Image: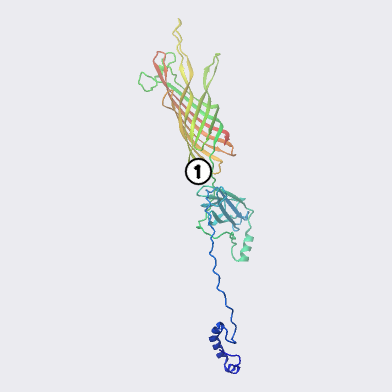
């Protein structure tokens, strides 16, 4: 090793030799100990590091179960926009279940104006997008709606439009920055889900229409009514063939049923209709209509005077209803089958029994009319569509009646209309009704032989109604 007193020898070494010796001997000198003077210093011995304790992992809690999407939180920043077609807003969506937990969803954005850009998933149940308003439109706001395609749940948010920034403002911004203004990206976690295509719609956002539990309404029909009756000549065949004109002479005919025909405007009519669904798919319904009409035919009154002939036609029904949803997302489309009891009255024009013969001549018969009640089974189908807003409900239906009293199908009823719900509880209905009734009768003849005849009726009416919906 190099001693401290060897100064002369050390001076003879050049700087290059000292550098080489230092590089060669410094590592060994750093570890030498207990032999006189040394070059440099020696560190004290270091104790070996203590072994580290094993890591303790906290138990992972089990995943919390989540339900379907019950609501969607829609956040828009800023809360208002100028209608300049350039300034953008950031839209952030969170899908939550009934407990408020974020749950998986397949979200889409719909807007009434403007454009949605860069719609993407940011994680489970979290989506982000950029909303760009239109330029120079008359609308005062944009409705932004988020829809979950899995559950049909939706939520809407309105963004006021504060007016356009103007062409000069836009040009100044471009001239100053050298580029079109860009929307500021929302602060959000990294994208972990797939990026989806932007969705833009010009129509208002769909809303899931809940089923209604029932309705009651008063009806007022007005329209046209026609009546025709004719006897059958049973001597010709078993089919109903009209007798010859000579046989229909009122003074000598043996036929009981009169041959008549009339037409009238339906007036002084009223009706009631109601239904209730205590459970979603099964309900009950019922109602009645009283269709009053007056003809130009003069009839003799009990006091010997005359008056235009008129009558009231009654229809009463009670039925069981079904409700089969054909579409439940957005607007609601329901098929409504019905089956129940139907009672109705029918007017029959006939001859009275002849009076007794007198010395002045044979007995005579007079024309009269009688009312009969018919009972039967009513069945049919209806179709209703409640639009997403819940304001309009078009409907169409068909009913038929099989009579227990005279046999066969006697009634065919078609109705089409539109119900309006300006309030949740208010119902206004307007529609067209067509009713046809064809009845084959068999009455006792004057000679004891049965007499048969046919009655055909047609009603065309415009029906308006108002009531309550719940």
**Depicted 123 relative to depicted 265: above or below:** below
Residue visible at 52% across and 18% down?
Answer: 299
Q: Quadrant of residue 270?
A: top right
Q: Is residue 121 visible?
A: no
Residue positioned most to the top? 359
Name the quadrant of the C terminus.
top right
- Look at the numbered disc 1 and give the secondary structure of its residue: loop
Name the quadrant of the N terminus.
bottom right
Q: Determine which residue is flagged by label 1.
A: 328
Residue visible at 56% across and 33% down?
Answer: 216
**Depicted 47 relative to depicted 232: above or below:** below
Residue positioned most to the front? 34
| Model colouring | rainbow
Percent x, y for residue 414? 47, 33
Percent x, y for residue 153? 54, 47
Q: In this rendering, would 349 be left or right of 82?
A: left
Q: Is residue 402 visible?
A: yes
Crowd rating for badge 1 (residues with CA inside 10 Å; few <14, some 14–19, many 20+):
some
**Depicted 97 relative to depicted 436: above or below:** below
What is the tally of numbered marks visible in this picture? 1
Percent x, y for residue 148? 52, 50
Percent x, y for residue 185? 58, 60
Depth check: 338 or 373 in front?
338
């Amino acid at each position: 090793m190099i001693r401290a007193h060897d100064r002369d020898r050390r001076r003879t070494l050049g700087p290059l030799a000292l550098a080489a010796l230092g590089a060669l001997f410094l590592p060994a000198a750093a570890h030498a100990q207990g032999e006189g003077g040394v070059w440099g210093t020696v560190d004290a011995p270091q104790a070996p590091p203590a072994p580290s304790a094993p890591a303790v992992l906290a138990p992972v809690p089990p995943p919390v179960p989540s339900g379907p999407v019950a609501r969607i939180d829609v956040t828009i920043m800023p809360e208002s926009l100028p209608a300049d077609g350039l300034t953008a807003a950031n839209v952030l969506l969170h899908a939550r279940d009934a407990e408020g937990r974020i749950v998986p969803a397949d979200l889409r954005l719909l807007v009434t104006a403007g454009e949605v850009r860069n719609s993407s998933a940011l994680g489970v149940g979290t989506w982000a997008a950029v909303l760009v308003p239109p330029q120079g439109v008359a609308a005062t706001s944009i409705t932004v709606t988020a829809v979950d395609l899995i559950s049909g749940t939706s939520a809407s948010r309105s963004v006021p439009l504060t007016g356009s920034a103007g062409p000069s403002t836009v040009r100044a911004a471009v001239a100053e920055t050298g580029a079109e203004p860009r929307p500021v990206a929302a602060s959000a976690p990294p994208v972990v889900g797939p990026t989806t295509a932007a969705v833009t719609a010009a129509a208002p956002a769909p809303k899931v229409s809940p089923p209604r539990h029932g309705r009651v309404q008063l009806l007022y029909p007005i329209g046209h009514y026609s009546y025709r009756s004719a006897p059958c000549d049973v001597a010709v065949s078993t089919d109903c063939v009209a007798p010859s004109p000579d046989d229909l002479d009122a003074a000598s005919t043996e036929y009981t049923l009169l041959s008549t025909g009339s037409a009238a405007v339906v007036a002084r009519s009223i009706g009631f209709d109601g239904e209730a669904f205590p459970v979603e798919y099964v309900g009950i319904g019922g109602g009645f209509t009283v269709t009053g009409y007056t003809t130009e035919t003069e009839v003799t009154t009990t006091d010997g005077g005359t008056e235009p002939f008129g009558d009231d036609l009654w229809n009463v029904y009670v039925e069981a209803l079904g409700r089969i949803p054909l579409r439940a997302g957005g607007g609601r489309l329901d098929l409504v089958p019905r089956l129940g009891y139907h009672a109705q009255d029918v007017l029959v024009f006939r001859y009275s029994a002849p009076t007794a013969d007198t010395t002045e001549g044979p007995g005579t018969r007079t024309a009269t009319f009688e009312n009969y009640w018919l009972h039967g089974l009513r069945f049919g189908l209806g179709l209703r569509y409640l639009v997403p807003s819940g304001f309009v409900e078009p409907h169409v239906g068909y009913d038929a009646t099989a009579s227990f009293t005279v046999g066969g199908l006697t009634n065919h009823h078609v109705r089409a209309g539109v119900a309006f719900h300006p309030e949740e509880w208010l119902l206004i209905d307007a529609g067209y009704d067509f009713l046809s009734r064809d009845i084959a009768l068999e009455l006792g003849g004057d000679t004891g032989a049965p007499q048969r005849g046919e009655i055909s009726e047609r009603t065309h009416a415009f029906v308006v109604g108002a009531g309550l919906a719940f």
